[in-house]
Image (tube, grey):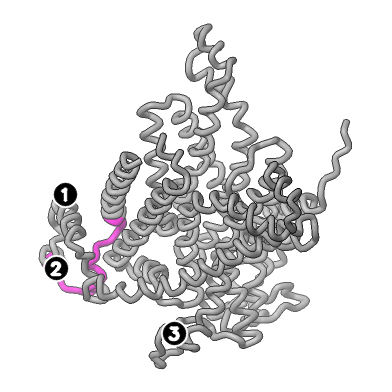
């Protein structure tokens, strides 16, 4: 078993290295030089070249590559030429804000899946099941940003129940646990959760329905156990495994959706940061956020794989 | 011939699909106005739906309905091209990996793993910028991401198929690799590939809409996503311009929903194993 763990860890490290390298070369391929962001087109001759030399952009690409890797290993994420600050300063808070949106939404989504889907399976064949499934598929078919705008249209502008976006009322400086924050969190969280529900819900439902045909269900029912108890206690436990295995894919989907949600709801997180960074040609921030998100996905997948070993040891016999 | 009743859901989805295809092909005939270009001077801006403008007007007075109709063509074309290209690449890669195994397989699958690890949306956006913000760039960038799913699935299926007796028999009489793959393995993959094509089409349209919405889409064409980008950027939301915001997104949702419903039905009909939704 430990051999598998070591192997997996090594693969993870290699993946991170490849990720960092690809990130570097990907952004190198983009047109434009960061220096142009600083000075604009009207600068006198020689200024551009001087700046390029000063910041080391004229060095050969391999030198810059090794410098980049070296910086990363020391925790230096680079320098933003738009904000004129270390990238670290700018994205420190954003990481927390992103988590503040992502975690409640994920929890809400999974709560619904683990409680609601067994209920739906219990009532299979009913119109409730059909409607719920269609709604889930519909939420998965609509672009997340549109569902967000649509929700804003109805609940913020139409009914005026919720604010039009943002994380807090500007200037209030309220903490992360205030009512103000919760009011701002409510709508994006609901929309995001609705989107995240899609994959695990359908997966769990299918697995549970398949399990219902298995003999152990008949045995338990013969013992006289009620349907609801069977579903929640026995079948659910056995069907939960695919959710774990697909957690990696779900995280990928979630992070993709994070970008859209943050832009629509003006949420000051990493997603909006990278979109803005690309728009303003602030490649230092874009590169750093891209790397961070990639690293989070790699770590998450690693965690999932490692925890899967605990759950199903057969995996180690590859 | 067995009687086979198709559910209303499938019929509805098929109808939706046909309607959109008709809209795309006959856009010039159906749309009352031109979607872009100089605006009709008699229309006001941000007008609510009326008799002359079924879905109202945009921030500079263009007809929303016409834009939706023409947008169908753009969104559909980009989606189809992406789905086709990525399914093609994915199938080829999956066949190579599954059939030859060994180092080829490791190379392909590790690459696929990498593409699963990087943030997909951000990667596509950066690639689109690097390739120039054109429709072609969009298609290429999206395909560069979407080929990863079919590859895994095709590889798995190929590995199962190549164990069949007829493959061994063909090898015994000296049939070359290429012919085995093309004549024996690939035909059995076709149902699965078709279903994956449909699913990829759905996701490609959503991805294109999202990328266009964020402002990174093709510069010269007007897709549904681009319409939503304009609506959002010009304050359509704060003005409550629901006639501009709801239709494009609703079209996307309807179309993709229908695609997903049909692909599930197709999967059942062709007896394809249940696949995870990417």
Residue ranking furthest to the front: A223
Badge 1 is on which residue?
A62
Nearest-to-viewer mark from 1 and 2:
1
Dot label at residue A51: 2
CA gap, disc 1 to disc 3? 47 Å
Please tell me which residue is depicted at 57% across the width and 66% down the height of the picture.
A111
Q: How many numbered marks have been drawn onto this rendered protein structure?
A: 3
In the image, A291: left or right of B221? left
In the image, B142: left or right of A114? left
Residue A96 screen position, x and y as percent: 37, 74
CA gap, disc 3 to disc 2? 45 Å
Residue B157 screen position, x and y as percent: 55, 32
Badge 3 is on which residue?
A177
CA gap, disc 1 to disc 2? 20 Å
Please tell me which residue is depicted at 13% across the width and 52% down the height of the picture.
A63
Residue B153 visible somewhere in the drawing: yes
């Amino acid at each position: 078993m430990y051999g598998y763990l070591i192997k997996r860890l090594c693969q993870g490290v290699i993946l991170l290295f490849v990720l960092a390298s690809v990130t570097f070369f990907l952004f190198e391929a983009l047109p434009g030089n960061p220096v142009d962001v600083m000075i604009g087109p009207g600068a006198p001759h020689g200024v551009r070249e001087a700046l390029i030399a000063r910041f080391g952009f004229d060095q050969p690409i391999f030198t810059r590559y090794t410098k980049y890797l070296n910086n990363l290993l020391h925790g230096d994420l680079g320098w933003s030429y738009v904000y004129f600050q270390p990238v670290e300063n700018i994205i420190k808070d954003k990481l927390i804000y992103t988590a503040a949106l992502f975690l409640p939404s994920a929890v809400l989504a999974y709560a619904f899946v683990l409680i609601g889907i067994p209920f739906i399976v219990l009532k299979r064949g009913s119109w409730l099941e059909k409607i719920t499934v269609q709604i889930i598929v519909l939420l998965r078919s609509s672009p997340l940003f549109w569902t967000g705008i649509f929700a804003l249209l109805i609940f913020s502008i139409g009914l005026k129940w919720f604010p039009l976006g943002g994380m807090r009322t500007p200037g209030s400086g309220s903490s992360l646990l205030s009512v103000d924050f919760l009011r701002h969190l409510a709508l994006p969280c609901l929309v995001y959760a609705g989107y995240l529900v899609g994959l695990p819900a359908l997966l769990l439902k299918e697995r549970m329905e398949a399990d219902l045909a298995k003999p152990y269900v008949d045995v338990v029912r013969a013992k006289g156990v009620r349907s609801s108890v069977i579903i929640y206690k026995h079948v659910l436990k056995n069907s939960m495994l695919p959710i774990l295995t697909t957690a990696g894919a779900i995280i990928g989907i979630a992070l993709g959706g994070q970008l859209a949600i943050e832009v629509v709801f003006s949420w000051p997180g990493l997603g909006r940061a990278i979109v803005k960074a690309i728009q303003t040609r602030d490649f230092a921030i874009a590169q750093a956020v891209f790397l961070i998100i990639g690293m989070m996905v790699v770590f998450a997948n690693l965690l999932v794989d490692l925890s899967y070993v605990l759950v199903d040891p057969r995996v180690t016999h590859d | 011939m067995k009687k086979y009743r198709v559910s209303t859901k499938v019929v509805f989805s098929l109808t939706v699909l046909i309607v959109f295809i008709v809209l795309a092909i006959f856009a010039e005939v159906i749309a009352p106005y031109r979607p872009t270009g100089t605006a009709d001077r008699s229309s006001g801006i941000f007008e609510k739906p009326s008799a002359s403008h079924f879905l109202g007007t945009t921030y500079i007075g263009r007809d929303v309905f016409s834009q939706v109709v023409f947008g169908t063509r753009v969104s559909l074309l980009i989606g189809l091209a992406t789905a086709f290209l990525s399914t093609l690449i994915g199938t080829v890669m999956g066949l190579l990996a599954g059939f030859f195994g060994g180092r080829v397989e490791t190379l392909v699958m590790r690459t696929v793993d990498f593409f699963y690890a990087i943030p997909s949306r951000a990667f596509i956006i950066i690639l689109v910028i690097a390739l120039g913000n054109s429709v072609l760039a969009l298609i290429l960038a999206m395909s560069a991401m979407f080929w990863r799913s079919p590859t895994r699935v095709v590889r798995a299926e190929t590995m199962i198929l190549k164990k069949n007796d007829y493959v061994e028999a063909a090898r015994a009489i000296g049939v070359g690799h290429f012919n085995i793959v093309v004549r024996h393995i690939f035909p059995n993959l076709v149902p699965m590939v078709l279903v994956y094509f449909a699913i990829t089409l759905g996701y490609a349209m959503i991805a294109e809409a999202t990328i266009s919405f964020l402002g990174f889409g093709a510069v010269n064409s007007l897709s549904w996503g681009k319409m939503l980008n304009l609506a959002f950027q010009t304050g359509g939301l704060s003005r409550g311009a629901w006639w501009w915001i709801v239709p494009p997104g609703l079209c996307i949702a309807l179309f993709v929903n229908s695609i997903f419903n049909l692909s599930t039905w197709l999967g059942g009909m062709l007896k394809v194993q249940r696949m995870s939704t990417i």
